[in-house]
Amino acid sequence: MVPTPSTSTELLPLAPGAPVKQQDWTHLIAAGTVLAGGALMVTGHKKVGMAMAAAGTALALLDEPAVIEGWWKNLPGYLNQAQDFLEKMEGYIEGVSTQGRRVQSLLRRG
């Protein structure tokens, strides 16, 4: 005999005798939103896709207050790392630009 779900939020077990798991709709909706946002970004709708992915991520984190609190406490460190990365990239781009000007001046002489 196959057990039937007692409510609409329960799923049938995959194997006889396996426990029935309650479906977490919040995480499914969040995952779908993140995937849809990614698909939008890939198809060229970057702003809408980014907003949708951010909304899905926020929805997924609603059930994880400890994670949000940890991120909030570590946010200054993340911002410092991002600033350091951007400064390194700026230096790299300036170096490439300088090299490009040198190559252009050599080509103009020849």
Image (cartoon, grey):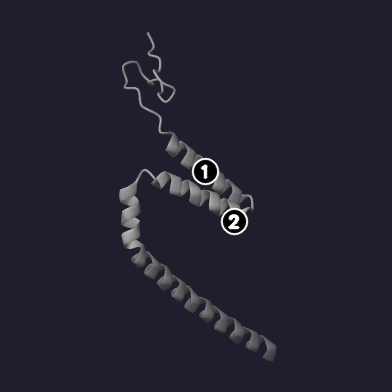
The x and y percentages for residue 42 are 60, 50
At numbered mark 2, what does the secondary structure look like: helix, strand or loop?
A: helix
Is residue 81 found left or right of 101 in the rendered image? left
Q: Amino acid at mark 1?
A: Thr
Of the image marks 2 and 1, the number of the one nearer the N terminus:
1
Above-or-below relation of 82 to 53 = below
Mark 1 lies on a secondary structure that is helix
Depth check, front residue: 81 or 58: 58
* Residue 89 spot, x, y in % from top left: 48, 73
> Which quarter shows the N terminus?
top left
Q: Residue at x 59, y 52 (%)?
A: 48
Seen at 54% across and 49% down, the residue is: 52
Residue denoted by label 2: 47
CA–CA distance between discs 2 and 1? 14 Å
- The residue singled out by tag 1 in the image is 33
- Residue type for callout 2: Lys
Q: Quadrant of the C terminus?
A: bottom right
